[in-house]
Image (cartoon, rainbow, N blue to C red):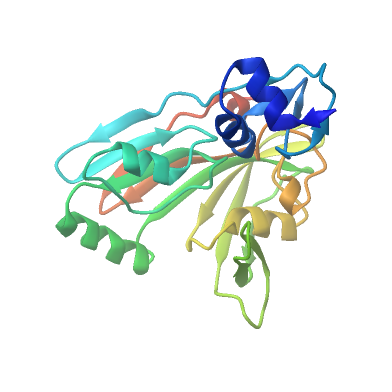
């Protein structure tokens, strides 16, 4: 038996540090199971598989703004660091794919930040959720985020900040549903927490109660409208059609 990251490093001919980073980023699998703990003891016969993220695609760019289609498993701050002079206007969770906006100058950044503050930004998401959804519904519940280690959010009517999520049905496959989501606030893990609270956790979101194994929580930021401009990212394969 040996630690997973050491076995991976030997198998791939990479450093222990790089191997641990790949596991921590959720990119390493054994069969269909994600390796979640870099220091987990595993058999020396274990065969790993690395699934690297898709390429970051630029959807639009001008003097004010860069719009990218963020793949799952890439941190928003990695993209910010790779585009010289760009500043994130918002962020997506590492495992969430979709539209991400970065400002290219301070004047535009301030206008955009004010629009976010005044809730003048329209954000639309697509997700696969547990259960059958056939009617639209809303979740209007305050969210409190605990930031000790990995961030975790929950409904808390005393400590939480206002949060509103609107959900519309799109497709049903067995006991899973594809839904369209709009949020008027941007609390940490808002969609994930609200859908779990409504009894429909996002497929693959084990942190918030999904019993289904998946490579990631099946959530995609499809469209965003800011200061009269709209940008849309095509649905990746795992969102377009649930297996």
| Residue 193, placed above or below residue 13 | below
Query: Which residue is located at x 28 percent, y 38 percent?
Result: 83
Residue furthest to the bottom in view is 158
Query: Which residue is located at x 56 percent, y 65 percent?
Result: 164
Whole-percent x, y for residue 19 in the image: 61, 29
Whole-percent x, y for residue 9 in the image: 63, 23
| Rendering quarter of residue 141 | bottom right
State whether residue 243 appears in this view.
Answer: no
Q: 42 or 93, which is in the foreground?
A: 42
| Rendering quarter of residue 113 | bottom left
Whole-percent x, y for residue 236 in the image: 53, 26
Instruction: Identify the image quadrant of the C terminus.
Output: top right
- 44 left or right of 168 in image: right
Q: How many marks?
A: 0
State whether residue 212 appears in this view.
Answer: yes
| Residue 227, placed above or below residue 204 | below
- 180 left or right of 200 in image: left
Instruction: Identify the image quadrant of the N terminus.
Output: top right
């Amino acid at each position: 038996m040996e630690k997973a990251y050491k076995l991976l490093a030997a198998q791939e001919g990479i450093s222990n540090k790089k191997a641990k980073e790949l596991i921590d980023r959720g990119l390493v699998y054994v069969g269909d199971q994600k390796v979640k703990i870099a220091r987990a003891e595993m058999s020396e016969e274990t065969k790993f598989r690395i699934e690297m993220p898709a390429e970051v695609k630029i959807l639009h760019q001008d003097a004010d703004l860069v719009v990218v289609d963020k793949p799952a498993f890439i941190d928003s701050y990695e993209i910010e660091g790779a585009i010289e002079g760009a500043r994130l206007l918002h962020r997506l969770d590492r495992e969430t794919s979709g539209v991400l906006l970065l400002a290219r100058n301070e004047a535009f950044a301030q206008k955009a930040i004010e629009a976010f503050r005044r809730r003048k930004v329209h954000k639309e998401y697509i997700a696969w959720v547990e259960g059958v959804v056939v009617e639209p519904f809303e979740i209007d519940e305050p969210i409190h985020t605990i930031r000790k280690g990995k961030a975790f959010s929950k409904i808390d009517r005393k400590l939480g900040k206002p949060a509103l999520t609107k959900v519309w049905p799109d497709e049903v496959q067995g006991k899973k549903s594809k839904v369209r989501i709009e949020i008027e606030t941007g609390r940490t893990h808002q969609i994930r927490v609200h859908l779990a609270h409504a009894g429909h956790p996002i497929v693959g979101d084990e942190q918030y109660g999904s019993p289904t194994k998946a490579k990631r929580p099946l959530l995609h930021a499809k469209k965003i409208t800011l200061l009269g401009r709209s940008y849309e990212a095509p649905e990746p394969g795992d969102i377009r059609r649930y297996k």
